[in-house]
Amino acid sequence: MLGVPSAISRRASVITYEAEMNLVIHAGGGILRAVITPERLTIVATDLGPGIPDLDLAMKEGFSTASDRVREMGFGAGMGLPNIKRNADVLKIDTEVGKGTTLTATVFFGRQAEQGG
């Protein structure tokens, strides 16, 4: 990806996949945008879904509000936000119940950033 190390490309792919799944599973859609500069890749996922009532709880591995139908399809294991956090160098989540969520995850292209946050 863009001549960056494969470890950084993998991290960006995990973040993008998990953010996209959250948009589909929890918000019924939204906008996923990537902003690329020479120093970093910033992934922004914005939705007008239900918002996240307890962000601290949502960040815990295994916690999920996915429906039984989604779980039967093999999704909704409660690893989305923890995986995003683990792979981002910087993660910011702005959420308001009843109004939606904006997740901003940044991966720096520098050598020291190859391990993740």
Image (tube, grey):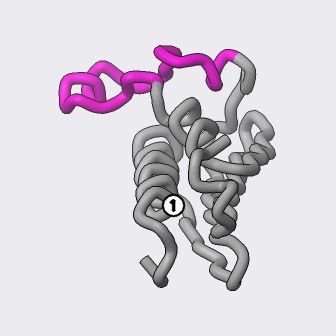
Near-viewer residue (3 or 93) = 3
In this rendering, the answer to whether 95 lies above or below 59 is below
Label 1: which secondary element: helix
**Magenta-colored segment: predominant secondary structure:** loop
Q: Viewer-proximal residue, 103 or 38?
A: 38
**Which contiguous range is marked in magenta?**
57-78
* Residue drawn at the location 61% of the way across and 45% of the way down: 116
Give the residue displayed 49% in from the left and 53% down from the top. Answer: 11
Q: Is residue 110 visible?
A: yes
- All told, the count of numbered labels is 1
Residue 69 rendering spot, x and y as whole percentages: 25, 26
Instruction: Pick the residue in front: 21 or 3.
Output: 3
Q: Nearer the viewer, residue 108 or 94?
A: 108
Q: Residues within 10 Å of mark 1 (few under 14, many from 20)?
A: many
* Position in image of residue 58 (x %, y %): 63, 23
Residue under label 1: 8
Q: Residue at x 75, y 44 (%)?
A: 93
81 lies above or below 31: above
